[in-house]
Image: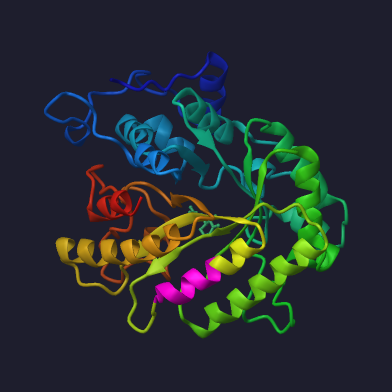
Amino acid sequence: MTHRIAMSRRDIFTAMAALGVGSLGPATLGTRPAWAQDSGGEPERGLGEIARNAGRFYGCAVQASYLAKEPDFADAVVREAGVLVPEWELKWGAVEPQRGHFNFAPAEAILAFAEQNGMTMRGHTLVWHRNIPAWAKSALEAQDRSLMGIHIKQVMNHFPTVQDWDVVNEVLDPGSTRPDKLRDSPFLTALGPRYIAQAFRYARGVAPQARLVYNDYGVEYELPTHKTKRDAMLRLLESLKREGAPIDAVGIQSHLVTRSGVTFDPASYSAFLKEIAGFGLKIIITELDVQDTDLPADDSMRDRVLADAIQRYVEAALAEPAVAGILTWGLSDRHTWIDTDPTARRSDGLPSRSLPLDADLQRKPIWHALAEAF
Ligand code: XIL
């Protein structure tokens, strides 16, 4: 079985233009890697299928350029994922770098790739304090009250088949001096604390059936900041529900760490998920990966520790019936934001081993931990 980057001529053209590449390479991808074959010649099941059989979903974040330029990577994505998330292509700075000048082509290329290979795409992200283009940031800071709604409508209207959206991202800050712990952001400046409920209403106006998600990080561990954020999140959810905001799910990013002194407690985490579910909301693990910042260099040692951290976390998450699925932030160690982030990458310069597949697209212990947990 080979997978095709089955894009229309128009898709190919727009993707190429967007990526600044002259050729997409061969449309038919190369021979299947060894891990994709068993003795009977039948492909081994990927995580997407394993999750689906368990009534969950599995997917990963990707960048359009990887799919276009790396056939082996594209093949692994088709093999493993049921859902794709654009890693940056739908962020405001990417879709509308100048006011009224849209660049939807890279996200369109991911959507086309997903749909033509039997996957769905989820949208990430509409309202986020980071990656706001300069023109929009100044307009919001000058208290432009219509811009957020216009932005939500423009992006969502462009992708009517996308039915799962991170509407707001990272809206809480445990270090805030505000009692509600709402993050200081241009949206808060422009619209006040009700901007979150308003964002969900705008999104619902465009997509009556879509799953509308509030996504955030920093609630996974027994750290004081995480405890503060859990409390603030539950209070925010309560107020959103009280005023009838059309929110369907909470996304928990789940950028895990293996630093000493950072404890994961399955019982306390499960109790937190149960409280979210108690609001009638679904939960998605949206950006799972695990940092190996302080671990020794040895690969197999690192792999065991990282897989163990993932397994403990994911088993606690999947024990909660409201958890609909898991997305990793990337698929292969070939491409991970961890190696580009000064606070997350290793000080010895070694590439991290934070994702299910290694840089050669071979399955690692993290892959097996996920497969087993599903
Ligand atoms: C990150 C991407 O992975 C990077 O490539 C980009 O430079 C910055 O953003 N939380 C989020 C994601 O919600 O959008 C972030 O993605 C990682 C943290």
Main SS, magenta residues? helix
| Quadrant location of the N terminus in the rendered image | top left
The correct choice, above or below, for 146 with respect to 192 in the image is above
Residue 41 drawn above or below residue 205: above
Return the residue nearer the eye: 317 or 93: 317
Q: Position of residue 248 (x, y in %)?
A: 67, 52
- Left or right of 257? Residue 31 is left
Residue under the point 43% across and 75% down = 267
* 40 inside magenta stretch: no
Q: Quadrant of residue 171?
A: bottom right
Magenta residue span:
264-273
The x, y position of residue 302, in whole percent, is 22, 65
Position of residue 114 in the picture relative to residue 215 (left or right):
left
Q: Which residue does the image show at 60% across and 61% down from the upper left?
A: 277
Outermost residue to the top: 9
Q: Is residue 178 left or right of residue 369?
A: right
Does the segment drawn in magenta span residue 268?
Answer: yes
Res 45 → quadrant: top left
Q: Residue at x 34, y 66 (%)?
A: 312
Whole-percent x, y for residue 198 in the image: 81, 55
Asked if residue 210 lies left or right of residue 291, the reply is: right
Depth check, front residue: 282 or 15: 282
Query: Which residue: 36% across, 84% down?
Result: 261
On screen, residue 314 above or below 38? below
Instruction: Determine if residue 219 is in view.
Output: no
Work out which residue is located at the far left of the displayed protein and give it.
39
